[in-house]
Image (cartoon, rainbow, N blue to C red):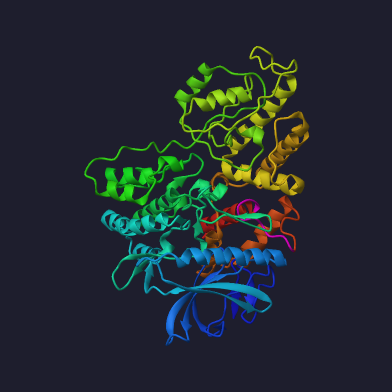
Amino acid sequence: MQVYCSKQHANHRSNRFCTQCGEPLPIHQGEIIANRYKIIKLLGQGGFGRTYLAEDRKQSAKTCVLKEFAPQVEEEQDLKKAKELFEREASVLKKLQHSQIPCFHASLQAKIGNHDFFFLVQDYVQGENYLDLLEKRLAKGQSFNEEEVITLLQKILPVLSYIHSQNVVHRDISPDNLICRRSDQLPVLVDFGGVKQLPASQGFWFTQMGGIRTILGKKGYAPEEQLRQGKAFPSSDLYSLAVTALVLLTGKEPQKLYDSYQGNWYWGKEIKVNPKLEAVLKKMLAYKPSDRYQNANQVLKDLKSPIPIPAVNPHITKLKTMVVAPGRKGVKALATRFHNKTQAIAQTLSMPVWLRPFAMSMIGTTVVALTFVGSWALVSAVIQGVSSITIPTITLPKLPDGSDSPTKPVGDSSNKEGTRISQILDRRTRLQIPEGFFIQTVDKIFYTNNPELVGRSLTSDSKDEALRQEWYSTAEDLLKKIEQAKLSTNARRQLGTYSRRNLRTWQQQAQNGEFGDYTIEELQRETNRKFDRLFPGQRGRNAKLDENTFGQIWYAIAADQVSKLESAN
């Protein structure tokens, strides 16, 4: 009998760790943990480990849940840090006392093989999670109705209000982390393995282990500030809860309800609800955290209010401009005209600082390269016209004579650099590659090639010109490789949204014979072959594809092959 790791590598059942990637494999049924907890079955699997149903042999065979935390680190200092972070999580969970949160019992450390594992022990909640309930309904051609979803919101929002009052953000709200308890039909919030406490000074929390930021949350359910920056606020949980509501209402995954290229939810198309509920959900789903409800009680109040809720513009997602290079000051008239044609929001992405004032990311689906007046002053003028963006302190580059007069001409080098950026942006737009994925992948390659720069943003100074040019070359090379991959338009537009769920779906389709005689192993081999031609060495023996960057291209190649198979059968 074979068992699979989370990357779908096949292993013999007797193996304790994956022979290909070293990941710990599921603990066998009947195994005893810490001389006390007997594993009954595997309940689920997440980013940091797995969840098991276990029997507490010291509590009259009472059932409980063991949440595994298995950090993939080798160095002693990293293991020490992992344990410290785990214990911090446990201390947060200990203080959460709510009837709709599983009671926390203990944290423990156990050695399995040569690796250390940490476990959280909590009450077992009898019932089904909402994802399973939804799948049962979909099998009958049904989904949850509006009344049921409103009832769910009204029953779970007080739980969020409670944990937020404890300065805790869940960060992973989704249908599979809400259980409908069999005894009273109340929703119970589970899987607090990723819960983080909010530092009073910062308002967000992320782990730093082995030099890699660990960001929690599911794609599609987690808002941008959480997935891109590791930030999490109470309004981040409200966003995830709203996505959960949409999934239950429509029976479709978030990726099917959201246009990642345009940055819009499909209101009135895939999503059809009454105006009042739509207004509440739109406010919960606002792109900017500050535009959302700031606490769960505000949502509850509006759900019960007979007064119509003011609509939130769903298109407030992008700053549709790109400043090409340091140069002359612009005039506020231009900024005002531009502001009248756009609604804006900025998002901080890890990218060279000359490409962003607060977050001058390439977020616009229509990018205007202001080659004739590109300057930091113009950036400030444009952004100041958009009240929703905060401007950091920026030192304006001086012109050759030491002045910053707007009458001085822009140098040839600035024009050339601006033209190059414009060409990169236009090319990305024509290929319909989501900007978030594109920038993240370019940064990944750039900082991998320049590890000494990790943690330092590039500047607009002349000393960084060679590095900026390297960043541009990296971006151009990535675009070239994606063109060579000959991906379909749909596959390119989905870059950044693929996940292991896609692979599990394809595996199930192959097992069901939907691909004829074609097997999942053949799909993986063909995808690997094409991917390796484009990115030789990325899948090296000890290399792991980053699921958010190179892994997305791998999935896109596989997705196109699956589409061909589905068309042929």
**Residue 549 in magenta stretch:** yes
Q: Is residue 287 visible?
A: no
Q: Residue lying farthest top?
A: 407
Question: Which residue is pictured at 59% across the width and 63% down the height?
Answer: 85
**Residue 530 location (% of width, % of height):** 69, 54
Quadrant for the N terminus, please: bottom right
Question: Which residue is pictured at 53% across the width and 47% down the height?
Answer: 201
Question: Which residue is pictured at 71% across the width and 58% down the height?
Answer: 539
**Residue 79 location (% of width, % of height):** 67, 67
Q: How many marks?
A: 0
Q: Is residue 105 above or below residue 186?
A: below
**Residue 170 location (% of width, % of height):** 46, 58
Q: In this rendered view, identify the residue nearer to me: 97 or 377.
A: 97
Q: In this rendered view, identify the residue nearer to me: 342 or 378.
A: 378
Q: Is residue 244 above or below residue 130?
A: above
Q: Main secondary structure of the magenta part?
A: loop
Which residue range is magenta in the image?
Answer: 542-550
Q: Is residue 395 visible?
A: yes
